[in-house]
Image (tube, helix red, strand yellow):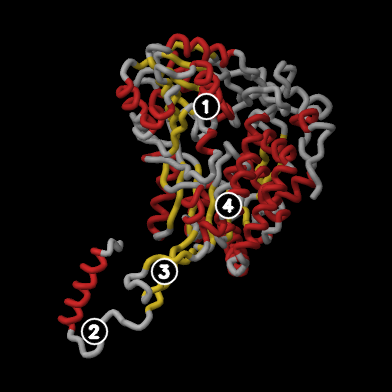
Amino acid sequence: MTPLTYARHMSEAIPGSGADGSSGGPVVEGPHDPEHDPRASYVLEPEHVARLTARIVATTGTSAQVHSPINGAPLANIPQSSTEDVAEAFRRARVAQAAWARVSVDERARILHRLHDIVLDRQDEIMDLIQLESGKARKHAFDEPLHIALTARYYARTAHRHLDTQRRPGVVPVLTRVELNRVPKGVVGIISPWNYPFTMALCDGLPALLAGNAVVAKPDAQTMLSALLGAQLLEDAGFPRDLWQVVAGPGRELGTPIIERSDYICFTGSTATGKIIAKQAAERLIGCSLELGGKNPILVLRDADIERAAEGAVRACFSNAGQLCVSTERMFVADAVYDRFVERFVARTKAMSLGATMDWDADMGTLISADQLDTVTAHVDDAVAKGARVLAGGSARPDLAPYYFEPTILEGVTPEMTCFGNETFGPVVSIYRFHDEADAIARANDGEYGLNGSVYTRDTERGRQVARQIKCGTVNVNEAFGATFASIDAPMGGMRESGMGRRQGAEGIHRYTETQSVATQRLIRFGPMLGMSDEGYAKFMTASLRFMDKLGRA
């Protein structure tokens, strides 16, 4: 495969993307000069883009152009799929899945483990494409190949633990043998988001492949290339090409056709869309897993390490410019440490290096789109107009990138403000003082979301006790979100309106299997024998049950 082409480094192919604001301002209408304006020509090598987009099942003859949020430079024209293309993708996937299901678990695991090495070897190429499509800082782009490598290695090395036939106790010791098989569901539909375009496109599908399924994926329209590169890497690792099908187009047009043909559906995105998908899946009696929105809290207790909490808060609130499902938007800080913590948190936030660049220097990149910028701006303006105080940030920065918004800390946010209970999904956090720990826990649990939370305290046992009272699917003690998200053996997902189902761990692969119980009976049957009457059989079984109970048998 030919790698991405760029002049020494990809960042040099994007003039004016630096933090000094020399260019890269808002996109404007009118002619563009290729010598001076990166919007006038494609950043990526057209031949490479063509190889990636050729993986899309699309026959409409139409395409959608995508641009980099860094400076508006065009990246690609993405072929668009029809409902007929979705049907064709599922047809190909079902043919491939029938053969793949006969491949041994050892061989599937071997290929998956090879993906681990490929992703680590080609991480620079992956990060370049992620940044060009999403605008995130390089340090946050690195999280994506890291997470995929962790996921691939975990499932490759634990394949037999999750998928091997297991013996279960039979009703009659020795005479009843029971085995539990894990049967692949068939073809899994995956609808993935733009905020983590590489890892979210792949991480849910890797255990599906290992379990013997095929995948039909519809990545978000804004970040198709990162997802297509992931599909290419799967083939490079040794997975059959037709096993992972990709379609492209608006979710409102392709979502229902995908759900109508899937044997299981996996979705990451908004709560509103997740509810629609859940209803459609229920109508077909197929399973689904949904990771949805969040208004995630951090609790800083009175005995917290202030510096550690302030450092963690910066990552929790501003990783990927706050465009992270598990990022923090609410902070509850004990009165005893509030002033000291706020001073350090604000200082660390103001010291962040801002810019939409391709190098490692920026601490935070840009929002991905005008829609995201509009939402963030509206939330902050509404809060300020109603009396909230801006402790840091608070403004858009078009001098850095068209959709850039500063990392922002708000104090004095009240329930009538839009950002109080609604997900912003941007670099904005509201900070609150608390006196009573029980009250802080209750406020953290307020609302309908329950995805991720954090607790900072020097007493880690106390931290775990508090964590058990927080209604979130994952809670980190003395860490923002990385401890749970990177621990692949631990399930990850939301409570309440933050979703249903889990990725990672045993739950993350078993969701793609049907359990099949096979029982083999020897010598006796379950009915009267040797002239025994039905009444006699009932008495015999009653005595047997009492005897088994005395033996302590379940």
Q: CA distance from mark 1 to mark 2?
A: 66 Å
Q: Is residue 507 left or right of residue 66?
A: left
Which badge, 3 or 4, is on the more N-terminal residue? 4
> Is label 1 in a helix, a strand or a loop?
helix
Question: Which image quadrant is residue 175 in?
Answer: bottom left
Q: Residue at x 66, y 38 (%)?
A: 66
Q: Which residue in the protein does label 3 denote? A: 517
Which of label 4 and label 1 is nearer to you? 4
Q: CA distance from mark 3 to mark 1?
A: 44 Å
**Label 3 sits on what residue type?**
Ser
Q: Which residue in the protein does label 2 denote? A: 528
Residue 374 in sight from this viewpoint: no
Kindly indicate whether the residue at mark 1 contacts the one at mark 4 (C-beta within 8 angstroms).
Answer: no
Q: Identify the residue at the far front of this view.
A: 551
Which of label 3 and label 2 is nearer to you? 2
Place of residue 296 in the rendered image (x, y in percent of width and height, measured from the top left)? 44, 30
Which badge, 1 or 2, is on the more N-terminal residue? 1
Which badge, 3 or 2, is on the more N-terminal residue? 3
Q: Residue at x 54, y 48 (%)?
A: 191
Q: CA distance from mark 3 to mark 2?
A: 24 Å
- Graded by Cα atoms within 10 Å as few (under 14), some (14 to 19) or many (20 or more), the crowding at tag 3 reads some
- Graded by Cα atoms within 10 Å as few (under 14), some (14 to 19) or many (20 or more), the crowding at tag 2 reads some
Q: Which residue in the protein does label 4 denote? A: 155
Q: Which residue in the protein does label 1 denote? A: 316
